[in-house]
Amino acid sequence: MPILVTGATGTVGAYVIRRLLAAGHPVRALTRNPPAARLPAGVEVVAGDFTNPASLVPALRGVERVHLVAMEGDGPAIVDTLAEAGVRRLTHLGHDDPSRSDDDPLESWHRVLRRAIESSDLEWTHLFPGEFMANTREWAPSIRAEGVVRAPFGNWRSTLVHEDDIAAVVVEALLTDGHAGRTYQPTGPQPVLRRDAVRMIGEAIGRELRFDELTPDQARELWGEVHEPEVVEWFLEMGRHPDGNSWVSPDVEEVLGRPGLTFDRWARDHVADFT
Ligand SMILES: NC(=O)c1ccc[n+]([C@@H]2O[C@H](COP(=O)([O-])OP(=O)(O)OC[C@H]3O[C@@H](n4cnc5c(N)ncnc54)[C@H](OP(=O)(O)O)[C@@H]3O)[C@@H](O)[C@H]2O)c1
């Protein structure tokens, strides 16, 4: 019986697939665009789009376990579609910021999906990770071209998490019992300063990198080219927090029996992204 991985072409999904295949499980991958999906041999690729829950039905045929990545869409209709198709176990990768209100545009659809999952009869496990190490790939173009990273808040600390640790927790929750009704918040093993992350990428690729610290106004201009204004303001608000985002969750170690992977390990895993 295949396990359906949604977000299969994304950052975490790629690692979930790799781990399921290594564990010998048949994998079906959901994507909106099968011809463009470059997935490992042996993966069954099926079309489907969360914005049209009925389109998920073919991908759900004969499936009891699903990894669901939260993307904007009609959360309750998606959950109903899964349950009606016979899905029993669900890992849900999303986001939760309890400090923000239900009607916050960045939060509301996540909350609606979360509540629909919790009201269902599915054996669900939420994963609300910390900031992904992979977000630093946005520095890749300027690193490749100029050996420079331009970003604000050089001393901002964040317990960046390796996407493979998130995937490992997902796979554990999909394949073993004891995770139903649990909420895991995978983080890395220690907070990392932005400027140290730049240094570690430089060490991994064997090139000295310069960190040019931007003012918040300069960052607003740079990020405004790629992100919605409310997302930019959210990033800036986080960056102003004096302690950064330095909470270390026990969840990776509790579920996997080992500490989370470090940022220098991530940088060594991702040399090709920066060269
Ligand atoms: N980045 C962070 O620091 C961070 C931190 C905490 C939580 N999160 C959460 O992590 C999740 C993102 O995970 P990720 O970074 O692994 O994903 P990602 O790399 O952003 O990729 C998005 C994936 O979602 C799929 N997708 C997008 N819209 C879809 C739709 N309408 N129907 C079906 N599939 C759709 C895409 O598939 P196709 O394009 O192939 O269709 C792609 O595989 C989000 O829920 C986010 O809130 C992120």
Image (cartoon, grey):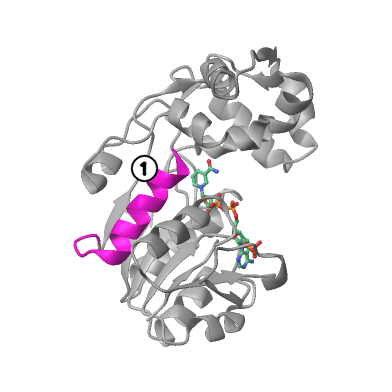
Q: Residue at 44%, 30% (x, y): give it.
A: 265
Q: Residue at 38%, 37% (x, y): give it.
A: 187
Q: Position of residue 29 (x, y in %)?
A: 53, 70
Q: Quadrant of the N terminus?
A: bottom left
Give the residue at mark 1.
186
Q: Please tell me in which quarter of the rendered image ligand 1 is found.
A: bottom right
Q: Position of residue 24 (x, y in %)?
A: 35, 68
Q: Position of residue 36 (x, y in %)?
A: 71, 65
Give whichever of 83, 63 is nearer the camera: 63
Give whichever of 117, 32 is nearer the camera: 32
Check disc 1 and report its element: helix, strand or loop. Answer: loop
Name the dominant secondary structure of the magenta segment. Answer: helix
Residue 126 quadrant: bottom left
Tell me if residue 82 comes above or below residue 98 in the rendering: below
Tell me if residue 25 comes above or below residue 9 in the rendering: below
Residue 241 among magenta residues: no
Instruction: Tell me the crowding category of disc 1: few under 14, some 14 to 19, or many 20 or more residues within 10 angstroms, Cα based.
Output: many
The residue range painted magenta reads 162-179
Left or right, residue 156 beside residue 1: right
